[in-house]
Amino acid sequence: MKRRTFLKAAAVTSSAAAFSACVSKEAREAFFQKDFRSLSTDEINKVIKRLEAQYTQKYGKPFSVSAKEPIPDTLFGYGLDISRCIGCRKCVYACVEENNQSRDPQIHYIQVLEMEKEKGIDFIHADMYYDHEEVPHEGNFYLPVACQQCKNPPCVKSCPVGATWTEPDGIVVVDYDWCIGCRTCMAACPYGARQFNWGTPHLPEEEANPDTHFLGNRPRTKGVVEKCTFCIQRVREGRYPACVEVCPVGARKFGNLLDETSEIRYILENKRVLILKEELNTQPKFYYFYGT
Amino acid sequence: MKRLGPAILLFSLLVVAGYQTAALNETSLQTTGNDQIDIQVPPPPLSEDFFPCTMCHADMEVNIERRELEEFHDDIVLRHDEENRWCMACHDANNRDMLHTASGQLISFEESYKLCGQCHGPKLRDWKEGIHGRRTGDWNGRKEYLLCAHCHDPHSPKYKKLKPEPPPQKPGTIK
């Protein structure tokens, strides 16, 4: 045996031994966890059990992590009535509470853009930092933007490791354990919908939402990308997303695009509808409309 | 048009069934499309200090004269086609716990949307479809509606301005 080969083998053996010896079983399992789509049902159950124990201990209350599959014959679509939205930002904070985003550093999935009525939809002159005493402010209208759940998503195409994909019910999701934090998807997204955990997410124990989904609102770690999932943990149970329920003016609508009696289908068939940056061929399933 | 068929049928059924009660219960109504969907309407936002109206009005003489109210209800500011209308345009003079439509048909406070819909037809249509106004509950099951009066003060229906939640942190201030 050559000296070099011996040293190589020795190094590998000893580091493997050291890894097994000083690392807990949980940490070892987490390290070797495969990407979500490669996991068998048994493996998913094992992963979920480990995560539930981990979150329960960390946040001091029982956590549930679901891996509930899509409801058959369902393709989710979202409607937002631009003529109704008053820019109160209640959706922004309801989303943060529901989806366990980091409070500090702050992560918001929804950006409410204030625009001038005279200019129309104009991203360059839009302001998301408006701070009026009362809204709607005279002469302005509001355009909340979050993930557009594109049918042709550039973020998914750009991910070098396959950590983000479109589920059969149309929701674009991220496997936070498979994401390498390269932020290519953020550069690819034309809507600024993806957020990065630059620091360790801070989620106060008392504010943590313990009803979670593996591909949705389970707690994230530093260095991963996250985004709106239409509240996957709620909508796969048949409920409306949190932003829909909190909107005081009822500007937010949600439903199954494949169900011709759904609210979203009524909007598509009867209202003036637009999608953002249509020319990019991203084919959003997020439809802005004029209810008036 | 085929979507409206079942709705008209159901609404006429509701009316035939004598759906006129002054009790402030949860009401349910069927909308168009999916007949399985049960939509719950919470009770109308009436103050217990004032409702039922007959608590006071039962013993009072009816005065339909248009006038400035002084002792009671003087806090109500009418900003809703006030040039042409007054209390009795909607409230019934003879049956104080009820409202009435332009044709004189009595309707309960739970069904006040029918009164609003006389002028605001397209809004009533969209509301029944779940497009106007907030819906909560299940996107594929039981939904909860609000009545017009839950969001719009019938006497002054323009939606009131709100204080917005705080703006997001600017990237420069994040450490």
Image (cartoon, rainbow, N blue to C red):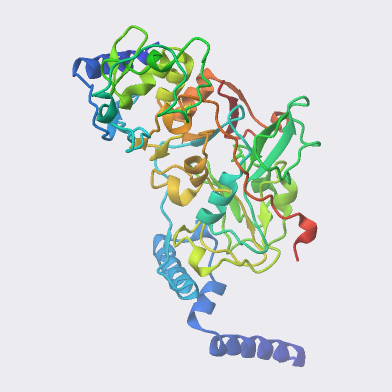
Q: Is residue B169 visible?
A: yes
Which image quarter: residue A143? top right
Q: Position of residue A147 (x, y in %)?
A: 62, 43
The number of discs equals 0
Quarter holding the N terminus of chain A? bottom right
Q: Where is residue A102 in the image (x, y as percent from the top left)?
A: 61, 62
- Seen in the image, is A261 located left or right of residue A232? left
Furthest residue in direction top, as rendered: B103
- Seen in the image, is A26 located left or right of residue B106? right
Furthest residue in direction left, as rendered: B17
- Seen in the image, is A73 located left or right of residue B60? right
- The answer to whether A96 is drawn above or below residue A6 in the figure is above
Q: Which residue is drawn at 41% across and 44% down?
A: A239
Q: Residue at x 53, y 23 (%)?
A: A268
- Viewer-side residue, A157 vs A172: A172
Which image quarter: residue A52? bottom left
Q: Position of residue A28 (x, y in %)?
A: 53, 78
- Viewer-side residue, A267 vs B72: B72
Which image quarter: residue B162? top right
- Viewer-side residue, A216 vs B86: B86
Q: Position of residue A65 (x, y in %)?
A: 43, 62
- The answer to whether A64 is drawn above or below residue B20 in the figure is below
Q: Can residue A262 be seen in this view?
A: no
Quarter holding the C terminus of chain A? top right
